[in-house]
Amino acid sequence: MGGKGLGKGEGKWHRKVLRDNIQGIIRVTRISSLIYEETRVLKIFLENVIRDTVTYTKHTRRKTVMTIDVVYALKRQGRALYGFGS
């Protein structure tokens, strides 16, 4: 009594709105297709930095990533970040 459910057609309306939103997002990505190469390069860069950062964190037997781990990972890749540690 008074509960929300799919019995009164509310579920179909919500699904339709969600599908329309997804279609709008897809159209935007098709328009900006020139950014795919930059996104791919950024993804590879982040994967490398995160991999090195996790390696530093595991080496010190911690479960929490510290700022200094990211600084060392960037320094290892030749992209030193100043102002965060020694």
Image (tube, rainbow, N blue to C red):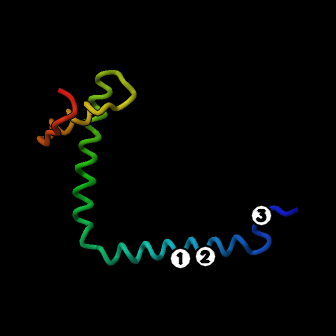
Other residues around mark 1 within 10 Å, as few (<14) / some (14–19) / many (≥20): few
Q: Which residue is mark 1?
A: 20
Q: Is residue 74 left or right of residue 65?
A: left
Q: Is residue 49 left or right of residue 7?
A: left
Other residues around mark 2 within 10 Å, as few (<14) / some (14–19) / many (≥20): few
Marks 2 and 1 sit apart, C-alpha to C-alpha, by 6 Å
Instruction: Check whether the beta carbons of the residues at disc 2 and disc 1 lie within 8 A of each other.
Output: yes
User: In the rendering, at what x and y percent does residue 42 appear?
Assistant: 24, 55
Residue type, label 2: Lys
At 81% from the left edge and 61% from the top edge, which residue is drawn? 3
For the residue labelled by badge 1, is the local secondary structure a helix, a strand or a loop? helix
Q: Quadrant of the N terminus?
A: bottom right
Q: Which residue is mark 3?
A: 4
Q: Quadrant of the C terminus?
A: top left
Residue 15 sits above or below residue 61 on the image? below
Location of residue 12 by image quarter: bottom right
Q: Which residue is mark 2?
A: 16
Residue 81 sits above or below residue 24 on the image? above
- Which is nearer the N-term, disc 1 or disc 3? 3
